Amino acid sequence: MTDEDDILRYDKMVENALRSVVRTAIEEVIESYDGTGGMLGDHHFYITFLTDYPGVKIPDYLRDRYPGEMTIVLQYQFSDLAVDDERMQVTLSFNDIPEKLVVPLSAISIFADPSVNFALQFQPLNDTMDEDDIILQELPDGDDEPDPSGTDNSSKKTGEVISLDKFRKK
């Protein structure tokens, strides 16, 4: 028996507890969302996840466009939102093409609801993956760089991939 076997992994316990906040928030949206408007009040979720994490199911063209990480926004137009103890799924429109995304909760690296200034940042939870197996992209610290996704969020209210840098205080 090693010393590591003798310790309680509080870090993992806290990560799991905080991920349950994400699951519960999504469950509450499922209960209240009628599919015709937006979420309750001004709530909207930015969910950043690792695209190369085991169990992530997204179209290849999205994985190619967003290697490493991708951020989705749940606000106005989404469908088939579901969540369980292991994963969430949602259908979003990309260039007017509906695409089903399946994301293990353990693949989520950031969950934010800017309407109430709430955000959680996570570390990957898979014991079988080494840190060398996952390369997290550094988030710029407010530089005035253009949005790398090239997404214009001004005209339509659709499921979009955006950069969180737009919401950082400078």
Image (cartoon, helix red, strand yellow):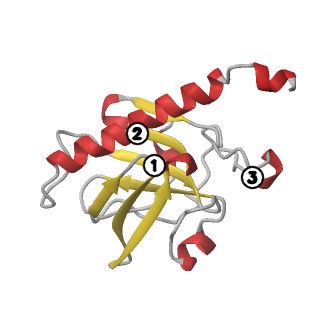
Q: Which residue is mark 3?
A: 135
Dots 2, 1 in contact, CB < 8 A: yes
Question: Is residue 63 toward the left or the right of residue 79 in the image?
Answer: right
Compared with 20, 1 (above or below) is: above
Mark 2 vs mark 1, foreground winner is 2
Quadrant (top left/top right/bottom left/bottom right) for the C terminus? top right
Q: Which residue is mark 1?
A: 47
> Where does residue 130 sit, x and y in percent of width and height?
79, 47
* Helix, strand or loop at mark 2: helix
Mark 2 vs mark 3, foreground winner is 2
**Which of the two residues, 46 or 59, is positioned nearer the viewer here?**
59
Q: Of the residues under marks 2 and 3, which one precedes in the sequence? A: 2
Q: Which residue is mark 2?
A: 22
- Residue for point 40% across, 39% down: 22
| Label 2 Cα crowd, 10 Å radius (few <14 / some 14-19 / many 20+) | many
How far is the residue under mark 2 from the one under mark 1?
A: 9 Å
In this rendering, does residue 169 appear at all? no
* Helix, strand or loop at mark 1: strand
